Image (cartoon, grey):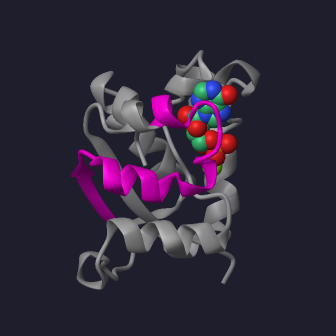
Amino acid sequence: MIKPDGVSRGLIGKVISRIEDKGLKIVGMKMIKLDENLAKKHYAEHKDKPFFESLISFITSAPSVAMAIEGKDAVRILRSIIGNTDPKESPIGTIRGDFGIDVGKNIVHASDSIESAKRELELFFSEEELVKYKRAGEEWIYES
Ligand code: IDP
Ligand code: MG
């Protein structure tokens, strides 16, 4: 997901390019301004953290772009494309390392496990909103 800072800074295209350039496939996408209810469900694991209220207020402050992304090892690869939670500690070459400075404005979200990906996808997409198609050149990305 491209968070409100990424959308508001005009970084949608750059973020999506990195995902596409890697060879991953976008199978669902929508611009959505999270309401408080959805934001609290999405970040439920952090409800007792000191930054929770500011996180909810930030994530509901402007639109985000939610994406469902498919590919071999997609969860692990996306986490490496986005980088560390704190952009200051994130290597150059990662989205957060290249575009961010403060942890509360780190541009993107990505699920950290298959389980959280399933849970989060269900929060943002219905079955009908996810599509199946073949990307051109997949035979030049995957060995088989
Ligand atoms: P992640 O986004 O890399 O998975 P999490 O630990 O799941 O990181 O935290 C969720 C989000 O909460 C972070 O992306 C960041 O925006 C925010 N956050 C995490 N730790 C802090 C903090 O110490 N201060 C302010 N915001 C934080
Ligand atoms: Mg997380």
Q: Is residue 29 above or below residue 57?
A: below
Q: Is residue 6 above or below residue 1?
A: above
Q: Is residue 61 visible?
A: yes
Q: Is residue 94 visible?
A: no
Please give left or right for residue 115 compared with residue 67 in the image: right
Query: Was residue 40 drawn as part of the magenta stretch in this picture?
Result: yes
Q: How many marks?
A: 0
Quadrant of the displayed image that contains ligand 1: top right
Q: Residue at x 38, y 32 (%)?
A: 57
Q: Residue at x 49, y 50 (%)?
A: 19
Q: Quadrant of residue 8?
A: top left
Query: Was residue 141 drawn as part of the magenta stretch in this picture?
Result: no
Q: Which residues are magenta?
A: 27-55
- Residue 104, given in percent of the width and then of the height, sits at 54, 25
Which is nearer the eye, 121 or 12? 121
Which is nearer the eye, 125 or 80? 125
- Residue 100, given in percent of the width and then of the height, sits at 55, 20
Please give left or right for residue 60 compared with residue 68 in the image: left
Q: Residue at x 44, y 52 (%)?
A: 40
Please give left or right for residue 48 compared with residue 53 in the image: right
Which is nearer the eye, 42 or 30? 42
- Residue 93, given in percent of the width and then of the height, sits at 66, 29
Q: Residue at x 28, y 78 (%)?
A: 126
- Residue 81, given in percent of the width and then of the height, sits at 63, 44
